[in-house]
Amino acid sequence: MATNVFYAGNLYKTSGEPVVSIFNNPYTTEDDSPLFERHRYIDRIYFDSRFDYLNINYQIDVTVPFPAVSAGGSGETITTIAYHDFGYPPVAILLDTDTREVVTNGSYIHIVNFSSYRTISFLMDSTKFYVKQQYSNTLDNLPAITRRYSIIAFSTTAQTPS
């Protein structure tokens, strides 16, 4: 019968380091493999104190208006949408509040008659977060739209298993 295991203690087979771990044991016999080979059994681990997890350091909701653009060309704009005081470009994501999707570079946010469109990318530097809008509207006008986003920035990045 499968069970979830909670382990808190010092590892006796290795360096004796203190560990807190929650992992799945799909077998009927005791199996503590995720404690000693955590990268190999990562699919069974729910939490392990030896991994570095992302810590949310900053979160803000913003509303971004995109102006109307007349037909007949293409271009781009870069708009500052929030300020931060990290002093370095943080690890951050931009979430579309309405669709609950992560904005990736070149995400389509507006298409008109399959001939005109607007895409955005999320940018940051050591003090600001930006949205870069790129548009192409050779045949149809792009009407003004407003989108709601959440910015989530993290203070620690996850460790890459070696």
Image (cartoon, helix red, strand yellow):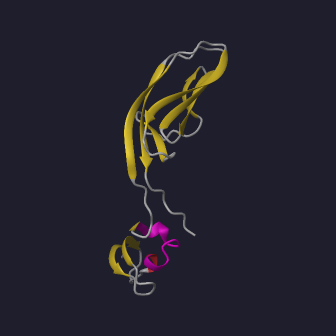
User: In what quadrant of the picture does the C terminus appear?
Assistant: bottom right
Going 55% across and 40% down the picture, which residue do you hit? 104
Q: Over which residues does the magenta segment extend? A: 35-46
Q: Position of residue 87 (x, y in %)?
A: 47, 45
Task: Identify the residue at image location x=40%, y=87%.
Answer: 12
Residue found at the far bottom of this picture: 13
Q: In this view, does 147 lie above or below 41?
A: above
Q: Is residue 25 above or below residue 71?
A: below
Closer to the camera in the image, 113 or 61: 61
Left or right placement of residue 112 versus residue 14 in this view: right
Q: Does the magenta stretch include residue 36?
A: yes
Res 10 → quadrant: bottom left
Identify the residue at horizontal 64%, vertical 22% (top origin). Answer: 75
**Does residue 15 appear in the picture of this structure?**
yes
| Above-or-below relation of 72 to 92 | above
**What residue is at 48 percent from the left and 73 percent from the top?**
38
Q: Can residue 138 be seen in this view?
A: no
| Residue 101 drawn at (x, y percent) | 47, 40
